[in-house]
Image: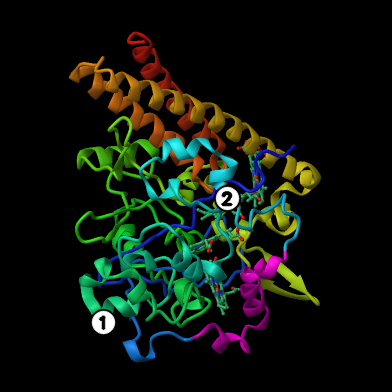
Amino acid sequence: MKLNKNLIISFVVILSILITSIGCAPQEDTEDEGNQQPQDNQQEDQNKKAEIPSPDEMILAAEEWKEKYPLIYESYQLTSRYKDGVTENPELGGSHPLDYLKEYPDIKVLYDGYGFSKEYYAARGHYYALNDVINTARPKPGASCLACKSADYEKLIAEYGDDLYAMDFHKVSQEAEYGLTCYTCHRNEPGQVQATTPQFNVTVEKLDFELKPGTEACAQCHVEYSMDSETKEVILPWDNGLEVGDIESYYDDMDFYDWKHPRTGTPLIKVQHPEFETYTGSVHDKLGVTCADCHMPTMKENGEEYLSHWAKSPLKTVEESCGTCHSSEIDGLTEKVENIQKETEEELLEIGAMLVQLIEEFGSALENEHLDDETINELWDLHRKSQYRWDFVFVENGNGFHNSEKARKTLDEAKDYAQQALDILSEFQ
Ligand code: HEC
Ligand code: HEC
Ligand code: HEC
Ligand code: HEC
């Protein structure tokens, strides 16, 4: 049985936001090692600021590039592939709307009081990003939810300024002409990666290393974020670094929480989709492999090579995505990945059950007024730490594969904190 097939994605989410100054887009070659990708590196030069096109000429539609890059254009259109019930092997790739609430009933308890306890589907292809966010039942705090769903976001900021973030989502989304398109990763210069999401462009300078274009393009959105409680600006919590503990300390320092659990009152953090943070520091990252190397490999059609723009599970293109390095073990590679995912899933289920028990016992002890303030504070702290770590791995879309070491360590800590809380609670039974 494959427990984990379609993973724990988290995407259907709101993303979002901010700031008018968009900077730092690559114009020139600096790229060197590692990247086994198409050459003639159009890489990046941190000192260059790309000009944002003026609002009336701002976004060229994907169709404009159809003639010049037919194979890329067609492959990009395949991100719509699962429309109308077209499915390939559903065991691989997770590209149909898997309902997490049915699959993982524990999350109704863990996310009680928060939007994800109402609706939570797995991510699909990029083609659907805008439609899917418009159609979720989860409440949307503001127009900043469009930041990772529509190429029009920069243009909307140019029009409305910082007021945009908190504006009515449904009203503003009617003005969005495009979803995720070529412009999102290239502006109007396909071939060069130019990040366009404002939250990424204002935060990336805090990192003490440079991103390769094949990772930068994705780190615009496949990241953890929060929203400023007043302005609804999207914030990337990178001030202290990208490690699980760094992000936690960033939130702790500002007493941040996404919601309080209705049974226990614990101020909790809801993690989003920290693919980039998880991947950073992994075996493959250290080798210089980028997100695009695995997810958008070079394909061949009628003898012509092109860079696939059908961002999807690399398990569908193992030969092309992994063959350069793992050629001698290609046959067993998918199984290796799945073993890591399965191990991760089992741990997640076990810790999820511990957290359910924690919430129930903590809730009843509070109702029965068994706990003094000091104990309550201590339990809040342990619950917050444990659930944050469980969530960090649960919502990450590689299901452990992107960085098995980090996933394991994070889950060990989650388990340890949950156990400490349960030990304390057992004294009050
Ligand atoms: C070494 C190859 C590799 C690299 C590099 C890599 N991934 Fe993945 N990624 C995978 C594999 C394998 C899966 C699991 C796919 C599956 O279970 O079908 C996956 C799953 C995903 C998924 C879920 C896809 C799905 O259809 O279920 C997303 C989203 C994702 N990765 C994003 C990223 C991002 C963003 C980066 C860079 C920060 C990245 N990946 C780097 C191999 C890679
Ligand atoms: C989600 C981000 C994303 C989107 C959307 C996107 N691209 Fe790309 N594109 C990339 C990345 C990443 C690369 C590889 C950059 C690198 O590694 O140097 C790339 C490379 C390219 C290249 C250079 C290919 C080569 O062989 O060197 C072209 C041309 C291109 N894209 C065209 C397009 C067109 C046309 C569209 C829309 C139909 C599009 N892209 C949409 C991320 C994107
Ligand atoms: C502008 C934001 C944005 C950028 C940039 C972006 N993604 Fe995504 N990605 C999304 C969203 C949103 C979804 C989920 C769409 C849905 O379910 O409607 C998604 C879904 C995916 C999936 C799941 C697809 C499936 O069929 O299940 C993969 C894989 C993925 N992205 C990889 C990448 C890679 C690799 C890059 C960089 C080359 C990238 N993404 C860049 C927002 C983004
Ligand atoms: C640039 C070369 C390179 C590419 C591309 C690459 N790998 Fe790896 N991979 C390595 C090396 C080196 C290691 C570490 C040695 C080992 O365990 O084989 C590794 C390790 C692994 C491991 C064990 C990791 C762990 O956490 O225990 C798995 C599984 C794996 N790779 C799968 C893949 C898959 C699947 C792809 C394609 C989607 C891929 N690799 C692409 C070089 C690569």
Instruction: Say which element carries label 2.
Output: loop
Residues drawn in magenta: 61-86
Residue located farthest toward the front when viewing the structure as drawn: 368
Looking at the image, how many numbered discs can be counted on the residues? 2
Q: Is residue 349 above or below residue 94?
A: above
In this rendered view, identify the residue nearer to me: 326 or 139: 139
Q: Is residue 312 above or below residue 375?
A: below
Residue 207 position, x and y percent, is 33, 52
Q: Could you tell me residue 329's position as x and y percent?
A: 78, 43
- What residue sits right under mark 2 in the picture? 99
- Give the residue at x 65% y 41%: 4
Q: Which sits in the foreground, 53 or 352?
A: 352
Work out whether residue 177 can be spotted. yes
Q: Main secondary structure of the magenta part?
A: helix
Q: Is 11 placed above or below 49 here?
A: above
Mark 1 neighbour class, 10 Å CA radius: few under 14, some 14 to 19, many 20 or more: few
- Image quarter in which the C terminus is found: top left
Q: Residue at 38%, 11% (x, y): give it.
A: 426
Q: Amino acid at mark 2?
A: Asp
Q: Position of residue 168 (x, y in %)?
A: 29, 70
Can residue 54 be seen here? The reply is: no
Using the rendered view, name the quadrant where residue 220 is placed. bottom left
**What's the CA distance linking mark 1 and mark 2?**
37 Å
Q: Amino acid at mark 1?
A: Glu
- Whether disc 1's CB lies below 8 Å from ligand 3 is answered no
Tag 1 secondary structure: helix
Q: Residue at horizontal 26%, vertical 70%?
A: 167
Q: Residue at x 46, y 77 (%)?
A: 183
- Verify whether residue 65 appears in magenta: yes
